[in-house]
Image: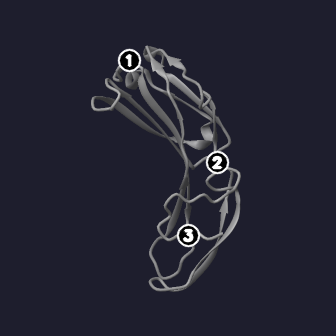
Amino acid sequence: MNVPSNFDNTVLSANGTFIAPGTFTITGSGGDPGPFSFQLNVTAPPVLSSPANAAKPTFTRANGATITWTGGASGKLIRLRGDNALDPNFNTGASFECLVDAGAGSFTVPPAILLAMPATPVTIWTFQPYVGLNLPLTGVSAGSVLLRYLTSFFPTLQ
């Protein structure tokens, strides 16, 4: 598998996932930091289980909103983001972002955050697991790869 150097619109698996779990060999011909080759072990990412990504759940702001998922390793992150707007172009509204340990399996967005969000039908929330891997490169102080995807859902806040 070859990935273009600009990484734009790259699909790395034929079954519709961005990158399939497995072991990948990454090589570079040189330049700065010089030639390199290493294996990258990608584990299965967490998968949103509730609400289902096609769902339009209703959350009562005073109760918080519980999001659950399956899979995920402790120490890895999931980004939960919510955007609620007063207009369809998202010119005016509010948003939140929470970074959660993937090993937890669930997270409740606290009522204090949801009460600051407008109760509006113009919403998009995203569930975005991050799989960050440190690269074993020599001759550089740090190297990493960040793999991520997102699942969107469209809740109503009361």
Tell me the quadrant of the picture where the C terminus can be found. top left
Q: Which of the two marks, 1 or 2, is nearer to us in this view?
A: 1
> Could you tell me which residue is drawn at 55 percent across and 25 percent down?
66
Q: How many marks?
A: 3
Q: Position of residue 41 (x, y in %)?
A: 67, 63
Badge 3 amino acid: Leu
Gap in angstroms between the C-alphas marked 1 and 2: 32 Å
Under circle 3, the secondary element is loop
Residue bearing the label numbered 1: 119
Q: Tell me whether the residue at label 1 lies in contact with that at label 2, contact meaning CB atoms closer than 8 angstroms.
A: no
The amino acid beneath tag 1 is: Ala
Q: Is residue 64 above or below residue 18?
A: above
Q: Pick the residue in front: 60 or 19.
A: 19
Residue 18 on image: x %, y %: 61, 53
Disc 1 is placed on an element classified as: loop
- The quarter holding residue 38 reads bottom right
Q: Residue at x 55, y 20 (%)?
A: 57
Residue at label 3? 135
Mark 2: give few (<14), some (14-19) or many (20+) Cα within 10 Å.
Answer: many
